């Protein structure tokens, strides 16, 4: 089992462990004898412009690999380039194959989320249609949103959940020292899937009340009911802490943040640009009750806080990167790495591969039965699912009091 030349790219929003998957791909490729290990600069978009690096020039020893595993964001650079369909732009596919042939690439790996897996789907289908049998196309999963189908969870989610649970706990402690009427609303990423906001439930414990209310996009958001619940909680405590997904929607399907959003922009995949949900709700509460409000957006911090990453997440990301490379060496193509949970207590997980057609363009949401208390909290089953993913700490290598990272 030996590899030919490989090329790997990163795509979509970065995470705190996407580089751990990259390290897993690199390490496995090196161990399986790949003569050349190339990295695309800025994903498929960079590849089309023949922008790539020899990764061995940057990862010369074990220490560089370990630093890479602890480096947030995408080391190779990312893109949000939507690969057109073959019928609309056959020349794009011809160009990709041309560049791969020029580098004598035998294995193509793409680390990304739902839209990135669509790229693998289309490339593998194009290769099959053109009878290109000497290049494999494989996907390595990545997304803090945890919304990829089939896999138990995704690399990046555990670390983001750990950051969210930790910060909600810290905000809860901060709120209780004040004697004023105040409602804190924390906005957490999540367009249609509320996995990230669900992680706010992890903060609750013997030493912390955690969030009072948690709202996910899987349920319809009723503003009147929301105000009534906030008012009811305020009868027994002056400080109210609410966690909301940025993508919560009202009954007509419009996002709550759209009520006050001046920016109606969409990205290259047609996704509306979200943001401002916490500010919108804070304004409504202030107008209704006259209380002090504090809107907080976690924004990109939740996906790049590697200083509080989950060791479980880092290790699993590395493992699944290697698993995909080994599968490619065995001749697999059009597949994606996945996690298969064996048990919860004790937590045991295996890696495997799965057909990309079952994963690309399929969005996994939080099970409705896990959302309780009239859509305002998460069940114990949800907490039992999330808890193992945030376990363990990974310490950055510190230089002059700050984390050491690797960059191009």
Image (tube, grey):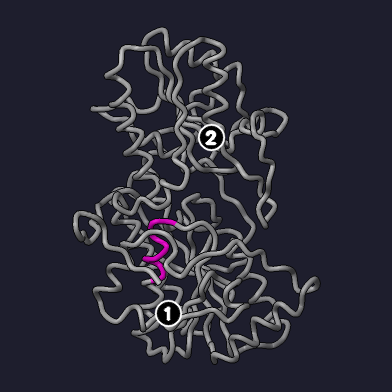
Q: Earlier in the sequence, mark 1 or mark 2?
A: 2
Q: Name the residue under label 2.
A: 216
Name the residue located 59 percent from the left edge and 67 percent from the top edge.
Answer: 356
Q: Mark 1 points at which residue?
A: 326
Percent x, y of residue 366: 52, 42
Say which of 83 and 327 sits in front.
83
On-image quarter of the C terminus: bottom left
Q: Is residue 21 magenta?
A: yes
Secondary structure category for the residue under label 1: helix
Q: How crowded is mark 1: few (under 14 residues within 10 Å), some or many (20 or more)?
A: many
Q: Where is residue 387 in the image (x, y as percent from the top left)?
A: 34, 44
The answer to whether residue 399 is left or right of residue 14 is left
Chief secondary structure of the magenta portion: helix
Look at 54% across and 13% down and name the residue there. Answer: 228
Q: In which quarter of the image is residue 335?
A: bottom right
What kind of element bears circle 2? Answer: loop
Residue at the spot 70% in from the left edge and 52% down from the top edge: 270
């Amino acid at each position: 089992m030996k590899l030919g030349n490989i090329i790997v790219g990163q795509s979509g929003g970065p995470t705190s462990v996407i580089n751990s998957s990259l390290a897993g791909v690199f390490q496995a490729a090196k161990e399986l004898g790949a003569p050349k290990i190339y990295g695309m600069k800025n994903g498929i978009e960079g590849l089309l412009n023949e922008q790539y690096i020899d990764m061995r020039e940057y990862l010369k020893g074990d220490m560089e690999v370990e630093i890479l595993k602890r480096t947030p964001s995408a080391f190779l650079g990312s893109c949000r380039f939507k690969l057109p369909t073959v019928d609309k732009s056959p020349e794009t596919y011809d160009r990709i194959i041309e560049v791969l042939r020029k580098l004598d690439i035998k294995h193509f790996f793409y680390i990304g989320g739902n839209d990135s897996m669509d790229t693998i789907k289309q490339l593998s289908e194009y290769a099959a249609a053109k009878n290109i049998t000497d290049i494999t196309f494989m996907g390595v999963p990545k997304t803090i949103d945890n919304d990829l189908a089939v896999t138990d969870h995704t690399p990046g989610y555990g670390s983001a959940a750990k950051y969210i649970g930790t910060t909600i706990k810290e905000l809860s402690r901060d709120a209780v020292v004040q004697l004023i009427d105040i409602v804190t609303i924390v906005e957490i990423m999540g367009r249609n899937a509320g996995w990230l906001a669900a992680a706010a439930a992890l903060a609750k414990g013997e030493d912390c009340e955690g969030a009072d209310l948690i709202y996910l996009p899987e349920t319809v958001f009723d503003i009147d009911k929301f105000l009534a619940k906030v008012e009811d909680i305020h009868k027994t405590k002056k400080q109210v802490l609410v966690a909301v997904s940025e993508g919560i929607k009202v009954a007509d399907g419009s996002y709550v943040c759209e009520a006050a959003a001046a920016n109606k922009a969409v990205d290259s995949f047609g996704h509306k640009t979200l943001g401002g949900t916490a500010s919108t709700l804070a304004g409504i509460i202030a107008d209704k009750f006259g209380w002090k409000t504090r809107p907080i957006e976690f924004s990109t911090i939740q996906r790049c806080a590697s200083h509080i990453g989950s060791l479980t997440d880092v290790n699993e990301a590395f493992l699944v990167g290697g698993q995909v490379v080994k599968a490619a060496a065995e001749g697999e193509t059009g597949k994606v790495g996945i996690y298969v949970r064996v048990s919860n207590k004790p937590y045991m997980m295996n890696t495997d591969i799965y057909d990309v057609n079952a994963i690309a363009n399929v969005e996994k949401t939080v099970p409705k039965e896990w959302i309780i208390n009239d859509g305002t909290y998460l069940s114990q089953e949800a907490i039992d699912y999330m808890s193992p993913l945030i376990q363990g700490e990974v310490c950055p290598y510190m230089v002059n009091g700050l984390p050491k990272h690797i960059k191009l």
